[in-house]
Image (spheres, grey):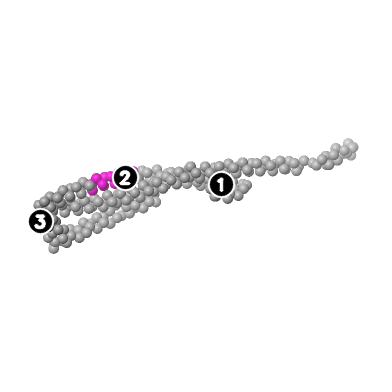
Amino acid sequence: MTGARRTPPGRAGRLRLRHSLDVAERGADLLEQKLRILRSEHQRLLRAREAAERDWRDLLSEAESWLLRGLLLGGEQALDSAAAGIGAAEVTVHWTTSMGVRHPATVSTSVPSRPPTAAAPTNTALVHAEAAYGRAVRAAAEFAAAHAAAELVGAEVVGTRHRARALRRHWIPRLREALDRSDLALEQAEHEDGVRRRWAARPSPEAAERGGGEPEGER
């Protein structure tokens, strides 16, 4: 409340307080409007995250099931041989901005194909496992992007709510209280100034006596 304490007295101070209150109220309105939009977007992103997580877990479960079959058929040696020479997947995140919040929008995932020089899997289960893990990697990238987007927008929801609440519960009431005090002080000063003017306009006792003591013919 340092701004209100430093407000100069008189009409200039009242105008400054009125302007500050108007700005604070408009700011609170804008923050609340932003908050409604952010909440809606956050709910959408939460639903997208839940769907992406389900897809990822389902695909991961499928891939692990095929891998287990492959291991039972060929052992760990078959897995090591099938994995040799396979490159790492690459993920590119595409970003967007929602109400000033930058967050992931989509991802592009590149899962490398098996090079011609790499040994082929020794059983069909490992072939299926390789394909299933490729799908699971793509789903994992989608889930990670959806999770990050929901977290970033959710953090902005919390921050915006705190700022709007601070304006409504603290700053605006203090400004109104300071404006009321300023109005009261200004009204009192104007009243006192009016009393002084009336007293100044009244004739002095000596002038009244002189005026009252003149003969009627000389008036």
Whether residue 180 is visible here, answered yes or no, is: yes
Most common SS among magenta residues: helix
Residue at (35% x, 45% y) in the render: 42
Residue at (38% x, 51% y) in the render: 101
Q: Give the amino acid at mark 2.
A: Leu
Task: Kindly state the secondary structure of the residue where label 2 is placed.
Answer: helix
Residue that extends furthest to the top in the rendered view of this protein: 216
Crowd band around label 1 with a 10 angstrom C-alpha radius: few (<14), some (14–19), many (20+): many
Q: Give the amino acid at mark 1.
A: Leu
Q: CA distance from mark 3 to mark 2?
A: 42 Å
Mark before the other along the chain sequence, 3 or 1 = 1
Query: Mark 1–mark 2 contact, CB under 8 Å?
Result: no
Mark before the other along the chain sequence, 1 or 2 = 1
Report the front residue among 219 and 199: 199
Query: Mark 3–mark 2 contact, CB under 8 Å?
Result: no
Q: In the rendered view, does 193 fall on the left or right side of 104? A: right
Q: Give the amino acid at mark 3.
A: Thr
Residue 156 at x, y percent in the picture: 39, 48
Crowd band around label 3 with a 10 angstrom C-alpha radius: few (<14), some (14–19), many (20+): some
Mark before the other along the chain sequence, 3 or 2 = 2
Residue range in magenta is 43-56
Residue 17, labelled with which disc? 1
Tag 3 residue: 122
Residue 46, labelled with which disc? 2
Q: CA distance from mark 1 to mark 2?
A: 42 Å
